Image (cartoon, rainbow, N blue to C red):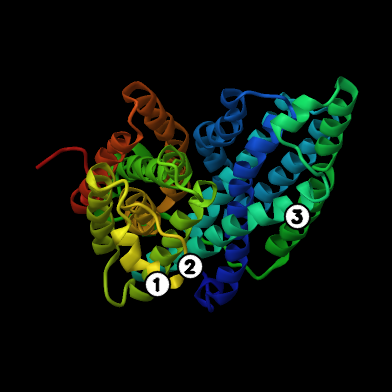
Amino acid sequence: MSMTAENKHSSVLPMVIVGILFFIFGFVTWLNGSLIPFLKVICELNEFQALFVTFAFYIAYTFMALPMSYVLHKTGYKNGMALGLAIMAVGALLHIPAALTANFLFFLFGLFVLATGLTILQTASNPYIVHIGPKESAAMRISIMGVINKSAGVLVPIVFTVVILSGMGDISEEHLASLNELQRSQLLSDLSLRLIQPYIIMFAALLLLIGLVKFSALPELDFDDGDIDLINDTKTSITQYPQVILGAIALFAYVGVEVIAGDTIGLYGSSLNVDNFAGLTSYTMVFMVLGYLVGIVCIPRYISQKTALIGSAIAGSFCILGVMFSSTTSTSIADIIWGWSGIPVLPNSITFVALMGLAHALVWPSVWPLALEGIGKFTAQGSALLIMGISGGAILPLLFGKLSQTLGDTQFSYIVGLPCYLFILFYALVGHKMKTWTLK
């Protein structure tokens, strides 16, 4: 990668600006968790229909990542970030007619457009963080972004509850069923209209961010042929880079187990009659933040990106085995780890689900620099392929749910995560080093 004199300046300003963008990623993405039960009420949906919120959001990454990479190639990375924010702003505006009509299809279309903007934003910003400084510390920089991203995820439910639900009283299905048709229709309309102001605020905030990115001193990155390994200087397609294709599969596996660890822990806790099952996702999130902090402190000073990836895969595999075979009644592990703090403890099996967050936290920041190393002008396309791996968050949890339904055993269904971690281990040991599809 050739860099202009401007690129050689301090990376502090770019880190701050991209950090703001990662906060937006987290806020918009984790907002889905609050929207699902909310839209289930106001659009009068069943559980299966409500889950199309997640489908509409993540399917955009699958279908729009490659087209957006070609746009990014034309616009450049700085302008691409601004364009992504502009598309997100349009998606925010689309939620206004959706709220006015309480039309679920409008909401899904708005979510798809929002995610399309996020797709180009992520396709631009992740390689930006990789290349804005020394490649040896890229995982550390992405870990910082991960802490910011997950912090937004912690704030979203609080903000949503305060802004949207405060003063509305009881909106449970039982209460709605007790109202007459006119009362119920009025309450649902009032609830829907409450979404308008937050999305107007989101629209305005995105416009401000467009100006921040567009008119800041954010340096442009120039990926040219000089960034390509000499061995690979005859390659003409991103598909000729095995480390990118395999990296996308590794991220597919990672995002799948990330969503499983965060979104099924409450269901599993409920099946075991854990008192605080509704808030169990916070345990996984806290452990993920701790994992990112480990990356910030230790990479590359004490461990390499490759070593971090190996450790994550092995630790994740042990967590899966722990979930499957440890006690569902004893809280001995949680007693040791945080029982002294006064925070409610969990049965050992559920504790291992939460610990998956710590185990795999460094997968995302470690795969990116390993996958993008030496691909030069193909960086935008490579980044798009990696972004497409996010679709694992939509597909693998469904596989988990189907297996759980078929077996009637949630605990054993976590075996879905074992091949995921094993593939990540393969990528750490072999896959990221593959420069050709021909095995020697």
Q: Nearer the viewer, mark 1 or mark 3?
A: 1
Q: Is residue 134 visible?
A: no
Q: CA distance from mark 1 to mark 3?
A: 31 Å
Mark 2: give few (<14), some (14-19) or many (20+) Cα within 10 Å: many
Q: Amino acid at mark 1?
A: Trp
**Residue 304 location (% of width, % of height):** 27, 68
Residue 45 vs residue 208: left or right? left
Residue 40 sits in quarter? top right
User: In terms of sequence position, does the residue under pointer 1 or pointer 2 come before the other?
Assistant: 2
Q: Nearer the viewer, mark 1 or mark 2?
A: 1
Residue 393 vs residue 326: left or right? right
Residue 239 sits in quarter? top left
Circle 1 residue = 340
Q: Residue at x 54, y 36 (%)?
A: 58
Residue 17 vs residue 245: left or right? right
Circle 2 residue = 144
Which mark identifies residue 162?
3
Mark 3: give few (<14), some (14-19) or many (20+) Cα within 10 Å: few
User: In terms of sequence position, does the residue under pointer 1 or pointer 3 come before the other?
Assistant: 3
Q: How many marks?
A: 3
User: In terms of sequence position, does the residue under pointer 3 or pointer 2 come before the other?
Assistant: 2
**Residue 87 location (% of width, % of height):** 70, 43
